[in-house]
Image (tube, rainbow, N blue to C red):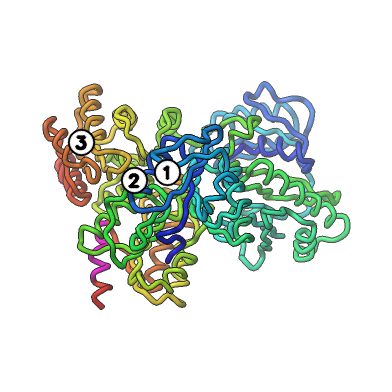
Amino acid sequence: MNLYEFQGKELFKKYGIPVPDGYVVSKPEEIRNDIFPAALKAQVLVGGRGKAGGIKFANNSEEAMNLAKDLFSQTIKGSRVKYILVERKINIDRELYVSITIDRSRKRPLVMASTEGGVEIESVDESKIIMKHIDPVHGYSPYISKIVNKKMNLKDNLAKQFSDLLSKMYRLFEEYDAELVEINPLVITKEGNLIAADAKVIVDSDSLFRHPDIPVNLDDLTELERIAKESDYSFVELDGDIGVIANGAGLTMATLDSLLLHGLKPRNFLDLGGTDNVDIVKNAFPLVLRANPKVIFVNIFGGVTKCDTVANGIVLAKKEFNVSIPIVVRLSGVHEEEGRQILKDNGIEAFSNMPDGVKKVSEIYKSMIGR
Amino acid sequence: MVYIKKDTKIIVQGITGHQASFHSNEMVKFGAKVVGGVSPGKAGTNVNGIPVFDNVEETLHLEPEATMISVPAPYVKDAFYEALDHGIKIIYVLTEHVPVHDSMEMINDAKLKNAIVIGPNGPGITVIHEKTKIGIMPNHIFNRGNVAVISRSGTLTYEIVKSITEAGLGESTVIGLGGDAIVGLSYVEVLSELKKERQTKAVVMVGEIGGTAEEEAAEYIKAEFNKPVVAYIAGRSAPPGKRMGHAGAIITRGKGTAESKIKALNAAGVEVADYPQDIPELLKKKLKK
């Protein structure tokens, strides 16, 4: 789960990581008279905010309120601005980069640092990025900072500040189950102090049960994805015309891919998971129908999820929700024959293998759009 | 032998749960030696004839060598260390949604103690020629043969295994690495086991978006793997930044795309199927050579 910059900075403060003076507002009238000149930073969860016009500067509260009105009425890369972080402007001498993330292949935390801060790290030449792994069993040790300091050519007071910062970042990373703690830019001020000008923190969604102080934030989901999440469906909204209901993440992805290889764009990803509950099958339909697909493709490989249960769920859904768009079903695995018979008896076409199902979807869709 | 053999003694932690009670019985039916189960407060009872104990310590007289952990995600780490600290060397975690920091710690610790971790969030391992399995793969899809399957998913794996079986081929070992971002085993580690295993003549890799495990496997195959490999990669249609069901199935910062994986595998001489159902034909072609 992505945290907003202001939430990340709250955590930074908690761990003693220096951040600029500031406060967050959700309407222009909340802007105060102190802390000027100030930066007004639109709080959005997408990257590249600065370039998209999400950061403004104001010398007084009147200017700030006008700029804030403007920002609140905008969308930044498709995201509506719900909060603005008002911060005292800092005197930038240099901009560095530092982050702690999880290296999936080495299965351990990775510190990345660079003297080339303030730009997206992906655009920095790899030779200019310092990388150092941390053993998760015993955690951070000061030697790590010493190595990074030397490579970044940070000395004396700055080196001391950086070591302190990195040890605190790691504590935050570990204690808050972070997938990423990133400071970009990490500013060296003209006064010679390190300060976190930005904060990007991603907390592992699976760890939220032990972080009651972190509010659940679903702002980077679409409305349908939020509804799906509330009813516990694994669902991703896409932009095509074919509604998809399948079981298992891998098989659901493979279903979308197979459609795409036939020139059909999926409208969604919906994984029923391992269930033998008719209602879970049935209630997936209104969700997919809300996305207004032209055809629904149900692709099931039965195991724990039995094919006859799925068939019954489909029949119930069709009646209860008056489904008028075509449904194509593929059922294979446990109780597949019973399942297909149930569907046939109710006038729904069912196939035993995936290619036949996809082909049928393709025929129906192409006849609908007149190709 | 890949990780388990026919007489490997297995316990199931969380055996009285809905999933574990069903699947422990399925394991027994397949031929696995499930010697006991653990469920705090339920000692003295049994699940389909499998004796239940309060903790792992009380199962030690049965000399368990492997465990299946099926407890809610917040309790996985404790169950895991209970197994590891009592000397169990094969630890399979079925549970989904284990916090990734827990997994990181468990897996790094297990490595120091020479224990093998399978999962979290995978279907486990089935060794067909040894008639044993730990996990939840359906018993009826297998046919004894010489194709090994390594995968990051569950249902898609069953689908592919069934198609291999129906094509008149058979399987040696089928292993699910798990759908999380951090899992115990990598393709490379499993391939290096399969390299020296006589039963396996060809390998199917079922991959998906996220991470670079498939790319690393491609490097390994190119450099030193000696058996034919065919692959399927799920997630060509996945948009960046969206988790496609599995915690690990996400394209982040341009890394982990299906294109990158397919390209790397092709460069290593691995044919990548467009559709899962094309796998048996590709295998037949390779096995004929």
* Above/below status of A176 relative to A214: below
Residue B125, x across and y down, in percent: 41, 55
The amino acid on which the numbered mark 3 sits, given as a three-letter code, is Ile
Q: What is the secondary structure assignment of the residue under circle 3?
A: strand
Q: What is the secondary structure assignment of the residue under circle 2?
A: helix
Tell which of B162 and B101 is nearer to you. Answer: B162
Residue A294, x across and y down, in percent: 24, 36
Q: Quadrant of the C terminus of chain B?
A: bottom left
The amino acid on which the numbered mark 2 sits, given as a three-letter code, is Thr
Task: Give residue A362's mark.
Answer: none
Residue at the disc numbered 1? B245
Residue A3, x across and y down, in percent: 61, 38
The subunit letter for the residue under badge 3 reads A
Residue A212, x across and y down, in percent: 63, 30
Task: Give the CA separation, mark 3 to mark 2.
Answer: 16 Å
The subunit letter for the residue under badge 2 reads A
Q: CB atoms at circles 1 and 2 under 8 Å apart?
A: yes
Residue lying at 46% horizontally and 48% vertically, measured from the top left: B35
Q: For the magenta stretch, what is the residue range?
A: B277-284
Residue at the disc numbered 2? A252
